[in-house]
Amino acid sequence: MYICFYSGPGVLLEGTLLDYSRHGITDIKGKKERWYILYMRPDKIHRRRFDSKGNEIEPNFSDTKKVNTGYLLSSYTLQTEELKSLINKEELIKISLRFTPHNSVAFWLPESEMEKTELETGEQLRVKTLGDGPFIFSLAKIDSGTVTKCNFAGDAQTGASWTDNIMANKSRSAEPAPEARGQGDGAEDDEWVCKS
């Protein structure tokens, strides 16, 4: 379903949670899911990098200069506008744009994952995206520069896929999600059309 909206290595960023909204999404096959959109003001943005074995190379968040690599000549440090052009997808922006605060970027998180994490506006977060799209692969709270609480795919089972973890948690959760915050409740049903 959402897989058609991403490709590439993705991004890793730190920023401030400004707001969030909750949405019911129906895909073209009629399947309905609930998602939260987190609106963040990014402070430090890096492209995700991997070594030849597929292991992720963590960036140095204190390094603010652009780094070019050999023959690729690609920058791993991004500005907010570069981030937006990389992860924003037209079909999803139609849903999130009216709720997005000024100077923020919208990131999507399944309701089942949001239920595992207590988030408050103003908190500092570290987010990894699933490819070059707005879907959150992992989420961590930052307290005085230290990651204090993680919500990483695969934490429970090494090697388990993100989708498997979400589907397993979705079937376990029976409690309703907390009410939406933000500039609008955003909980209306939205159409989600995936074009390959």
Image (cartoon, rainbow, N blue to C red):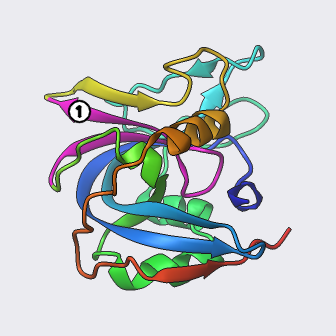
Mark 1 packing: few (<14 Cα in 10 Å), some, or many (20+)?
some
Q: Is 25 displayed left or right of 54 in the figure? A: left
Q: Nearer the viewer, residue 47 or 54?
A: 54
123 vs 25: above or below: above
Residue at 30% x, 70% y: name it.
103
Total tally of numbered discs in the picture: 1
User: Residue drawn 76% across and 76% down?
Assistant: 28
Residue 44 to residue 96: above or below = above
Residue at the spot x=60%, y=22% of the render?
Answer: 56
Could you say which quadrant of the image residue 57 lies in? top right
**Magenta segment: does it hold 66?**
no
- Per the image, the residue denoted by label 1 is 142
Q: Is residue 151 visible?
A: yes
Q: Is residue 35 left or right of residue 20?
A: right
As for residue 138 lying within the magenta part, the answer is yes
Confirm whether residue 76 shows in the render. no
Amino acid type, label 1: Ile
Q: Secondary structure at mark 1?
A: strand
Residue that sits furthest to the right in the current view: 196
Q: Quadrant of the N terminus?
A: bottom right
What span is colored magenta in the figure? 122-143
Image coordinates for residue 133, horizontal then vertical, percent: 61, 56
